[in-house]
Amino acid sequence: MEEKVRYTDEELQEFKKLIMDKLAVAKANLEELKAEAFNKNSNGTDDTSPTFKAMEDESSNVQLKEENARLAARQQKYIKDLEAALTRIENKTYGICRVTGKLIPKERLRLVPHATLSIEAKMQQNKK
């Protein structure tokens, strides 16, 4: 029996739906992080708060904003990777390992839908 070289159009549509769902959640999460970073969800009580804040409070606010910025950057990369996966679906190259040229197992793609490497190739990459 000949080895399968690409996923069928039906399988690609299944992956497309999965990716679109994950993309919607990722974009919503990014908007939440952005809103928190810019205090858009403020209760409007900033004017009434005491003007003397403890240094600890200011420090923790800075740390929180830095962490939100890191999370937002990570979320943006994830969104970019998901969008690239959608492009590969349109090109019918989705699910093909960029190192081995073999199909990435469906189980892996369901867990990491933006994967471009098989476990075998990923392990080789990690050894370097």
Image: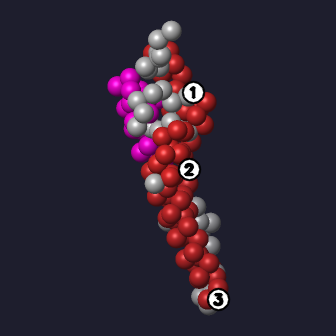
Inspect the image, locate mark 2, and give the three-letter code of the amino acid beneath it: Asn
Q: Is residue 31 above or below residue 43?
A: above
Residue 40 visible here: no
Task: Tell me the quarter of the picture where residue 60 sits.
Answer: bottom right
- Residue 81 in the magenta stretch? The answer is yes
Percent x, y of residue 103: 48, 26
Residue at 54% of width from left, 22% of height from top?
A: 14
What's the CA distance linking mark 3 and mark 2? Answer: 30 Å
Q: Nearer the viewer, residue 21 or 34?
A: 21
Inspect the image, locate mark 3, and give the three-letter code of the amino acid beneath it: Ala
Q: Is residue 46 above or below residue 87?
A: below
N-terminal of the pair, mark 3 or mark 2, is 2
Task: Tell me the quarter of the picture where residue 9 sits.
Answer: top left
Residue at 49% of width from left, 55% of height from top?
A: 74
What's the CA distance linking mark 1 and mark 3? Answer: 53 Å
N-terminal of the pair, mark 2 or mark 1, is 2
Furthest-left residue in this view: 91
Residue 81 visible here: yes
Circle 1/circle 3 CB separation < 8 Å = no
Which of the labelled discs sits on residue 54, or is there none? 3
Which of the labelled discs sits on residue 29, or is there none? 2
What's the CA distance linking mark 2 and mark 1? Answer: 26 Å
- Magenta: main secondary structure equals helix
Furthest-top residue in this view: 1
Image side of residue 87 versus residue 54, left or right: left
Inspect the image, locate mark 1, and give the three-letter code of the amino acid beneath it: Lys
Magenta residues, as a range? Answer: 78-98
Marks 3, 2: nearer the viewer = 2
